[in-house]
Image (cartoon, grey):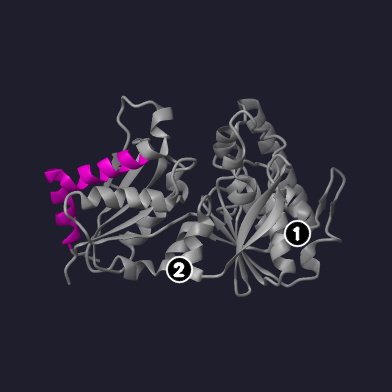
Amino acid sequence: MTHNKVVVAMNSFKGCLSSAEANEAVKVGIERIGYDNVTTMSMSDGGDGFLDAVMPLTGGERITVSVHDPLMRLIEAEYLRAGNTAYIESARACGLTLVGACERDIMSATSMGVGELIVHAINAGARRVVVGLGGSATCDNGIGMLTAMGVQVTDERINLDDFILNNHDVEFVAASDVTAPLCGTYGAARVFAAQKGATTAEVEILEQRALHFARRTAARLGRDCSDRAGAGAAGGMGFALTAYCLAQLTSGAELLLDLTDWSNVIKDALCVFTGEGCADRQTMMGKLPYIVARRTKLAGVARVIPVILLAGQVSYREVSEERPFDMVECINPDSMSLDECLQPEVAQHNIATAAERVMRHPEYLVRILSKSCQPIND
């Protein structure tokens, strides 16, 4: 078998490029040096772009619903209905991209819109609901979502009398973009709240809210799900779905790769390109590039397939160049301002240039070719 196919599976560059646009930019760069066997796969780890990635793999129908955004403004949001399964992208209802930088209010931002999408899907006949978690503007532990589903959470009690699942038998899957627990050093507040606008003092308030809600939930339901990997995804919605809806917590990236039959896609690949806007410790907590690299290494093919990471920003101390990635390349020149880098046309140009640089540079190309021919010795 000739191994000359290049597989491209980029995550979205949040607020800048979709997965498909980033993929196309890599393809343009690779084709500049004469490689014309490039396979692109639209991807998501549960956050932005989840529906767009799932749609071509499952078919189905897009359903538009009026829901509340993180600031309780009415917006139109879509979910996907495929048979009796509904696919919901939480970022479409409570995503950070829905809120301007000067509007962010992490202390009151709500996940209610996600619950409204879930209720609509269940009332329309869905008996399996897959919720993609990631890219949220919220850190409300999923309380807004639960409120829309009929759970009443007050200072005095948690009332489940009107909970929609009292009358419907529905299987839930929570497709998380990270492995973070709800609370603690690596939890929803302390890792992710700052990027959503929280001050240092607010991060600690949000942490205490999460701890308090977790304790009350455990006392009410008789189970503590706060330490589960992914419970802290999307501001704690992973926790709420697991505790109240008995959702199976899984990696959103793993779910997408399963749908694509990843091992078969890469069996004749020369190398794999993946990437995202910022590669740092969050990448190593279950973001798409990390899962792509790990799954590629474990694919079962009888040789090593190099994985190349392209990112707009790279924390080299947190993203090792050798594990799990064979190469790590920052797409942006040091001299370019962040505002310029975030312009879509500039980002596409920089991605294409980086991909071309990787494939054209003799040292890089030798490393790729030597690794792709190297057998795996168990």
Q: Which mark is residue 259?
A: 2
Is 344 placed above or below 164 here?
A: above
Which quadrant would residue 362 be assigned to in this image?
top left
119 within the magenta span: no
Q: Which residues are magenta?
A: 347-374
Residue shown at 72%/62% (left/top)?
120
Relative side of 35 to 256, left or right: left
Do we see residue 70 in this rendering? yes
- Quadrant location of the C terminus in the rendered image: bottom left
Residue in the foreground of this view, choosing between 124 and 7:
124
Is 4 placed above or below 189 here?
A: below
Which quadrant would residue 225 be assigned to in this image?
bottom right
Q: Which mark is residue 222?
A: 1
| Front label number (2 vs 1) | 2
Q: Amino acid at mark 2?
A: Leu
Residue 321 at x, y percent in the picture = 29, 43
Residue 145 at x, y percent in the picture = 72, 52
